[in-house]
Image (spheres, rainbow, N blue to C red):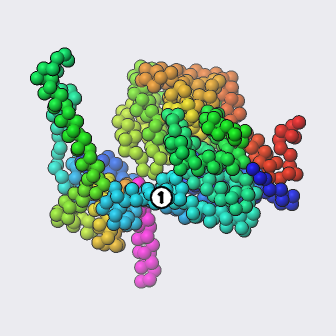
Amino acid sequence: VEIRTDMTSRRPHLLYVAWGYPPCRGGGVYRALATANAFARSGWDVTVLTVEREVFESYTGVDASLEAHVDPSIDVVRIPFTLTAHETDLTRYSWTRANLPGVWAIAHRRRDTFRFPEPNYGSWRTGLELAAEDIHRRRPVDLVVATANPHVAFAAARRLNKIAGVPYVMDYRDAWLLDVFTGGRLHAVGSRAARWEAGLVARAHEVWFVNEPIKAWHQELYPPYADRMHVVANGYDDGLAPDQPPELPDPDRPLTFGYIGTVSPRVPLAEFVAGWRRARADSPDLRDARAVIRGYLGYFLTPRPDLMAIVDGAGDVGVQFGGPVSKTEVKDVYEHFDVLLLLLGAGRYVTSGKVFEYVATGLPIVSVHDPGNAANDVLRGYPLWFPVATLSAQDIAAQLAAAARAAHTVDEATRLACRDFGERYSRERQLSPRIAALRAAVDPTVRAPAEVAS
Amino acid sequence: VRIVVVSGGNTLPSESVVSFVSDLDQPAPVDVITWGPPSAKLRRVCDRMVVLGPLSSPAEPVPDGPDQVPKVPLTGLTPARIKAAVLWRRRRARRFARSKVARARSMLGRDRARTWRRIRRSAPAMQLLAEADLVVALDSQAIRAGWAMSRRQPAVAAVLGLASAQVAARRMAVARSAFDAEQVAGSG
């Protein structure tokens, strides 16, 4: 990979490409926000290339409080994007879409993936590449970090690399070819997506993944480029964790179990509810306890009816859906929980960003997910961790009861040990080694961290 | 702002509509046009209601489900066994054909057409839509009705889903308040 060396008299310029950026409310937005901020704080001039605010208002939902956390030195360039398949304004529907939905869907998919093999997002490629070229023309870019998904963000990085030799980093929050839930392949060998990824990885300066299993899978797939692959775990954001260790709950007050995040269809919500019912009936520590779910039911603004039905059906045993939480409210919400519920989909490649926030709180955590989940690697050693062995109602109930008991009886030393455990997972600690290495790569006057250490 | 909620599915999500009505920032009259039967609670919170389909649809027993397969001895080619095998294959063929027909109907938008056809034949339903400022399609079967009304009356807003309807109702209420304030200022 060619690294340009004209960096002697100015701050390096980073182009950060992310579809989901504040005020988007999606799960991946915190990583995008933190990464761009970390570069800006490390002395880079950062330009973020993303979509217009209205896109989030229309499709994903907005967390307006997130915009206040964007570093003021960052220049945010917003370009148009239409998520046509999720359009809810019927006045914008064509005749074909309103009357022949199947025919429209086939034509739309073909049109969408014509320039980039990614349904719903592929058509963004043209606008993205033009915008990246424009930014580079106005102020030369020294490094591009593109975060996926959507993977079309990589197209902008590839474009600047092709026309101007700008090095780029591919930042994966999940994976493109790997199904992180099943461990299988999402795209066949030789498919357009596979060919695109191979080309991108071959020219990338670094490739980031959120956990070791995903990195290992890709290292096996692309052995010649294994050394440029790194784990940049999500970590928790500073200022999120409560300032003081949580107080012991009043033994006479019913406990509140809490979940914050997006409940996707992969999450074992029905299994949790069955276990919760059983625990409420059997354990005196769970008498009148509540299980509060905060966030989104499904990936979009509108709650998925099937998930909503599960929650509504368990209202009689204290399961409640409290709706979305803004970034500024998260800290307060954690302070009202006595025990945290980590509900995740199965898969040894799955790590939720939530797990890092959870360990930072110092509260008991009940893991309701497949034991092979990558989140276990983070939680192993956490003093108040209660993982289920299986997703049977009996096992889930047993761990819920144990966590409830611990919430009532835990001593001061254990709570402090939990907080200490969490500190190692701050977002800054995850990002700073990579940022230092990249700075050294684009600026020969700066030495890489390893050289400094030696 | 007068809101008309249209549902073409066999089951109307009454609870969601009730929540939608109670969560409106500014109270607005809400009418419902539905294929499936509404709940008593929904009837109480709605202004007017038109039911297009049958008022009640008791679950019908499945006539030839897997449990109804006649139990026959597994050895020998007995007439009863042959009959069971033929029936089993016929069921499979019918199920396959039904799924293909349903897919074709969906591709061609037949379900949507059914709802819109029934609405057009119903004078009370058309009356509700004619008075609407905002038409909310609750499901895919109601999309064509919402789309067609927005084409007939360009001033009518039409959206899919209750979450989008909340946003649209809020925007319309703000726009209307601004317009009223302008009128008052103009007349003063």
What amino acid is found at the position of numbered circle 1 in the picture?
A: Asp
**Residue closer to the observer: A57 or A438:** A438
Report x, y in % for residue A255: 50, 29
Report x, y in % for residue A303: 42, 47
Report x, y in % for residue B9: 26, 50
The secondary structure that dominates the magenta segment is: helix
Query: Quick check: is B178 in the magenta stretch?
Result: yes
The residue positioned 65% from the left and 24% from the top of the image is: A381
Query: Image quarter for residue A7?
Result: bottom right
Left or right placement of residue A240 versus residue A263 in this view: right
Report x, y in % for residue A357: 61, 37
Q: Examine the rendering and report whether any part of residue A26 can be seen.
A: no
| Residue sticking out furthest to the left | B79
Q: Which chain does tag 1 point to?
A: A
Q: Is mark 1 on a helix, strand or loop?
A: helix
Query: Quick check: is A336 in the magenta stretch?
Result: no
* Residue extent of the magenta highlight: B163-188
Q: Examine the rendering and report whether any part of residue A310 can be seen.
A: yes
**Residue closer to the observer: A131 or A247:** A131
| Residue sticking out furthest to the bottom | B187
Name the residue that disc number 1 marks. Answer: A112
The residue positioned 56% from the left and 22% from the top of the image is: A406
**Residue closer to the observer: A131 or A29:** A131
The residue positioned 17% from the left and 45% from the top of the image is: B56
Q: In this view, does A445 lie above or below A410?
A: below
